[in-house]
Image (tube, helix red, strand yellow):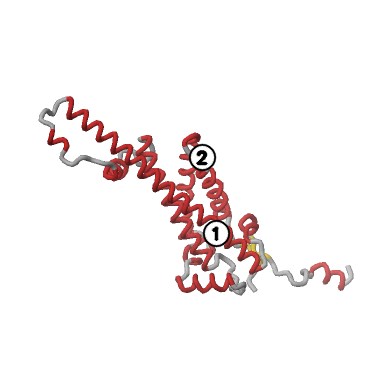
Amino acid sequence: MPLNAAAMSSAKPAGKRPMVRVWDVFVRTFHWSVVAAFFVAYFTEDEFLTLHVWAGYAIGGFLALRVIWGVVGPRHARFSDFIYAPATVLGYTRNLLAFRAKRYLGHSPAGGAMIVALLVGLAASVWSGLELYAAEEGKGPLAGTPAAITAPARAAPYEVGARFQVADRGESAEHEDDEREERGKAGGDEFWEEVHEVLANLTLVLVVLHVGGVLLASVVHRENLARSMVTGLKRAEE
């Protein structure tokens, strides 16, 4: 082969930098699996309660694994790589909105803050869902725990001292106790249902903000960040 032909065949296209692997298999699997499980859980409730519950279990399991991976995983998967001081996060966000933000190979300061917020929001949604499942169905890992029984009962109306106003503690008193228990259970159901709904909606807001941030950063840094979470590859640092 002529020398000039060999040089041409090995040369890289002008203006293009080599690609490097940034996101490992677990991070990519976690990301898209949680996306799918969250939307399954969000759009399935009473009519598909079993599916809803198992989607919540899946999210909880992935969150536990992600926390572990955030400590022992490769560089860009670790929390130490993408948790920045609040001032750095705010500074990056301002620069991103002004289309002059610095590019990061891993998560940017704003991206890292959003990851932490999403992990917290998802964990809180799973926890409140378990509380609701225990209070409403008497099932799940929290069924029968003091948190699932005592705390919601306090949210229901309770006539203080009513039991002491009954002279005869026979069937009448037992009936009143049963009614109080039912009211407490109903109050607990409503309490945890409201908490779960609020947390799930707040998490959805975070998801929308996250998608918007990814789209904006993709434009500013001229790279497809969503695709990189599929392939694991990003443009090498400048």
* Amino acid at circle 2: Thr
Please say if 91 is above or below 134. Answer: below
Q: Are marks 2 and 1 in contact (CB under 8 Å)?
A: no
* Amino acid at circle 1: His
For this orientation, the residue located farthest to the top is 171
Estimate the x, y position of residue 106 in percent, counting from the top left.
57, 65
Q: Which quarter shows the N terminus?
A: bottom right
Q: Which of these two is toward me, 58 or 117?
A: 117
Mark 1 = which residue? 210
Please tell me which residue is depicted at 18% across the width and 27% down the height of the picture: 172
Please tell me which residue is depicted at 15% across the width and 40% down the height of the picture: 161
Please tell me which residue is depicted at 59% across the width and 67% down the height of the picture: 105
User: Is 128 positioned to the left or the right of 38 in the image?
Assistant: left
Q: Which mark is residue 44?
A: 2
Q: Which mark is residue 58?
A: none
Q: Which quarter shows the C terminus?
A: bottom right
Please say if 236 is above or below 126. Answer: below
Please tell me which residue is depicted at 52% across the width and 61% down the height of the picture: 77
For this orientation, the residue located farthest to the left is 167
